[in-house]
Amino acid sequence: MTLSELFSGIAEISAEMADIEVKGVTSDNREVQDGFVYVCIKGNSFDGHNVAEEMLSKGAAAVVTQQRLGLEREINVENSRRLYPELLSAFCGRPTQKLKLCAVTGTNGKTTAVNLCAGILRTMGEQVGVIGTLGTDTGMGLQYAHSGPPTTPEPRKLYSLFREMADIGTRYCFIEASSQALAQYRFAAEHFTTAAFTNLTQDHLDYHGTMEEYYLAKRSLFDMCGRAVLNIDDEYGRRTAEYCRENGIDCVTTSVNGEADFYTEQVNLSPSGAEFWLTDKAAKKTYPVRISMTGLYNVSNAIQAALMCSALGFPLWRCLEALGEIKGVGGRLETLYDGEYTIIRDYAHTPDGLEKLLGTLKPVAEGRLIVLFGAAGERDSAKRPMMGEICSRYGDVLVVTSDNPAHEDAQSIIDMVTAGIPDGTEYVQFVDRGEALRYALDMLRKGDMLALCGKGHEDYQLIGSEYVPFDEKVLTEKYLKEKGLI
């Protein structure tokens, strides 16, 4: 591929550079090899423009800049970060032209929704790709599990995954669209057949600064989609519905609490799942639905997943029927043991996530509800005391511990969490999450329920820059075997 072919329809380049051969495209200076196009991007801690000249000396075919440097083989553009995905798409042969892309955004529920979507289509025999928090399935099973962040891969990895999906015949790809990915234009070259908005609550303010900026990043997804599926039980979902209507974006609304284009009635929650009726207001039809996950928030996630699949052309009744065939999503309200007592693990790690999870579990706990949780390091610290207060409202005993402290002092994080716990609340604290888990398991008695919050599917603890192996499911099963319970 030549530079003129790479930049065709994207940006103008000089005639002198047109026939230069291109062997790769990257924004990572560590990846630059002979013949690569290096895209200079200014980040929070590193500015690619500072090494542009060095990249040319390493053999880069050209450098893309958004501030003129006066270098040979320099291609100056208005926004290099936004252009980067366009170049990757072109270099990879525009693989998404062979895929129907679908995305879910929101603070909570993304992982559940995209995996329910994938599950629905798989029951119909379709080959489906998934990119998100659990890792990546290009259509042949989970090949690329995450060792840690991000939810949405950086652009070069993203397009290599798209290329692989296209090459093996995958037709549909469901993506968790994080706010950072949207703010950084990782999808700037794409159009989504359908996209869903689950909810928006406080998170990631360390990156976005304000809730409004956080929301606007999320909302930008719907400027790139054919049909929006919006949860209007959430105030930001209602705002997004107004925005879509004002801007001619096709949208449908959902609710588990009131009227919408699609709304639920007669919801019956049990420890093992939920049954309800879903009404299609426009068609004046009502469908019976059963899912194997409990909680109103999972009812909401399931409705949105079915409607996204329906937007792809599959009959709604069949999508809803398929929901009953899906067992659930790993690390999302997952039952690890249900005998004399019950042990649940979930990824809830925000105030809203904890509120919804514990509000669902408290009514079905026969005995005490014991809550093990912590707050992540190097993330929005304002939510830490809020998490402590919410857990104290629902939990009979709290076990406060670490959850990916990263480079922060773990005890300092715990102190911020416990500052929100009211006097008189029974709680203990452990910096070592393994000790915390053992303590919580030892105190269980008949009828109790233990909620392991925050780790979900994760099999590590991020301490400093190291991903230390730590799998609560494995450790819990080991404990249960030691006790002769499994």
Image: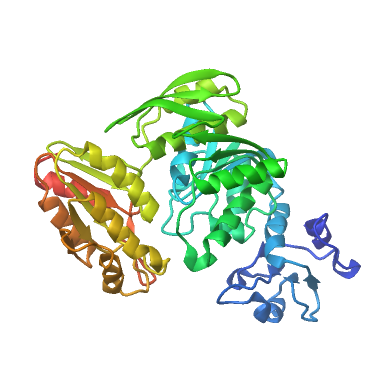
Q: Quadrant of residue 333?
A: top left
Asked if residue 275 lies left or right of residue 2, the reply is: left
Asked if residue 159 lies left or right of residue 387, the reply is: right
Count of numbered badges drawn on the protein: 0
* Closer-to-camera residue (276/177): 276
Quarter of the image for the C terminus: give it: top left
Q: Position of residue 65 (x, y in %)?
A: 74, 72
Q: Position of residue 373 (x, y in %)?
A: 27, 57
Residue located farthest toward the right when viewing the structure as drawn: 15
Query: Residue placed at 43% from the left, 41% from the top?
Result: 112
Q: Is residue 78 visible?
A: yes
Q: From the viewer's perspective, is residue 270 above or below residue 470?
A: above
Residue located farthest toward the top when viewing the structure as drawn: 285
* Closer-to-camera residue (479/82): 82
Query: Residue placed at 62% from the left, 26% from the top?
Result: 313
Q: From the viewer's perspective, is residue 67 above or below residue 203?
A: below
* Closer-to-camera residue (70/93): 70
Quarter of the image for the N terminus: give it: bottom right
Q: From the viewer's perspective, is residue 435 above or below residue 268?
A: below
* Closer-to-camera residue (74/454): 454
Query: Residue placed at 45% from the left, 51% from the top?
Result: 133
